[in-house]
Image: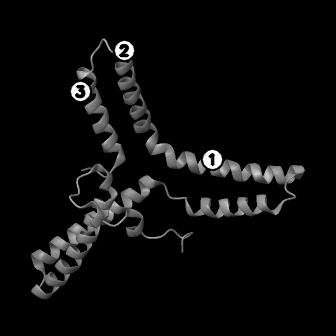
Amino acid sequence: MQLRPEIQIQSMIKAMMEVVLPAVDPSNELAVQQAQLVVGHLSIFAQRLPLQYRYDRDALDRLIALAADLKAAGAGGDSSLEQAAGIGAKVLERAKADPAELVQAARALTAAMDTSIRKVFAEGDEATQSRVEKVTLAMGREQLLRDRAWLIMQGWEPDPASVPAIDTLLAPTPAQG
């Protein structure tokens, strides 16, 4: 099971290229063409996925600028345009961090926690080790449940109904309150 889409996409491309395409009957031109189309689309996704968030931020930024230009040109008589542009500007301000920065910060924090936990178990007293173990295992249970919910559609869960929906396990965004 892989959570990161960039790894999932590379796995799918490899499976298509090494297993599926060679197994497709070469005389079935439509099947060969469609399998190649799938590989092509997956390759585009793999290339563009790291840029998608930046693309969306850029598009919103350009739309906000267009709204200002429309208002200046005389098309801003309706307050809905100004209101929507204001909301867009607030969203864009909150969206300054790049997703790669978020992943990197989480990885750095995980590495620092690993070092800290190892030090407690190498040098700490039993009471501290017990407390650290308790909070670490509690977080591990929460994370495992989130991971299982994230990947529920892959069909690995023996009782899918017992796993909560992923959106109920994620922290709300500032707009959700």
Q: In terms of image quadrants, where is residue 106?
A: bottom left
Q: Nearer the viewer, mark 2 or mark 1?
A: 2
Mark 2, residue position: 29
Q: SS of the residue at dot 2?
A: helix
Q: Position of residue 94 (x, y in %)?
A: 57, 64
Mark 1, residue position: 59
Q: Is residue 111 above or below residue 119?
A: above
Label 3, label 2: how far apart the Cα atoms are: 18 Å
Q: SS of the residue at dot 1?
A: helix
Q: Mark on residue 18?
A: 3
Q: Nearer the viewer, residue 24 or 121?
A: 24
Q: Nearer the viewer, mark 3 or mark 2?
A: 2
- Type of amino acid at the residue the image marks with label 2: Glu
Q: Earlier in the sequence, mark 2 or mark 1?
A: 2
Q: Quick one: label 2, few (<14), some, or many (20+) residues within 10 Å?
A: few
- Type of amino acid at the residue the image marks with label 3: Glu
